[in-house]
Image (cartoon, rainbow, N blue to C red):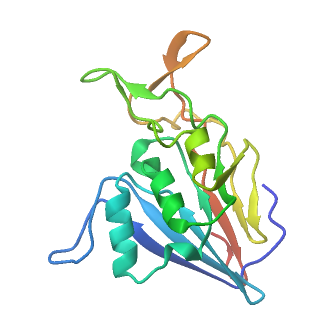
Amino acid sequence: MVNKGELNRLKVTVIAEDTVAYESPYLGQHGVSFLLTAERDGVAKNVLVDVAQNPTALLENMNRMQISLSCIDAVVLTHCHYDHTQGLTKVLKEIGKKEIAVVAHPDIFRPNFITDPYVRHVGVMDGDKKGDIEASGGTLYVTKDPLEVMPGLTTTGEVERVTEFEEVGIKLFTIQHSRVKRDEMLDDISLAANIKGKGVR
């Protein structure tokens, strides 16, 4: 992974996750979404990492946090599952910008399904596919390589499965060349931040 720059500061704000404290005004949901505010040489950029699965709840939480959707400069999707990607096009429309970068692995739109307790698609849902994203103002940057979102903030790109303990955790399947096979979730990517005085996080 190439990351030549350094950030002066990185702020991580949790927008959505599975738990909500007692009497919290925020809405919980299965899945996650984070807002990264990365600062470098007086320039701050806001990167939305995943959108969880309920855009109405996501937007409500951002409203309660007084975070304007228009501040978002890019979106990174860490993998295909609906609890990280569902409602992306609604969020992009609310951001209201043209050609907003949407970074993901090129296999993110493949079939991804479970068979227990019955066959059910759990990947990117209809309404959030490639054409829908582009029609909603997103510009897709799909790559297996690390991608520098800004100097000091880079995606990992595809992480090779090289050790026995790297398991998906649940039985997931996909279809390749008309054949059903176990899905190794090679689209699972992360972000790495190189922060001045703290190193890579």
Considering the image in quadrants, where does the C terminus appear?
bottom right
Does residue 187 show up?
no
Q: Is residue 2 left or right of residue 88?
A: right
Judge whether 72 appears above or below 55 on screen: below
Work out whether residue 160 or residue 176 is closer to the camera in this orientation and state it. 176
Work out whether residue 194 or residue 110 is closer to the camera in this orientation and state it. 110
Percent coordinates x, y for residue 16 in the rendering: 37, 64
Percent coordinates x, y for residue 126 in the rendering: 45, 36
Q: Is residue 172 left or right of residue 196?
A: left
Considering the image in quadrants, where does the N terminus appear?
bottom right
Q: Residue at x 23, y 77 (%)?
A: 25
* Residue projecting furthest to the left: 23
Q: Is residue 53 left or right of residue 151?
A: left
Q: Residue at x 51, y 41 (%)?
A: 80
Percent coordinates x, y for residue 43 in the rendering: 73, 85
Q: Residue at x 60, y 55 (%)?
A: 190
Does residue 8 show up?
yes
Q: Residue at x 56, y 66 (%)?
A: 96
Total count of labels:
0
Judge whether 20 appears above or below 105 on screen: below
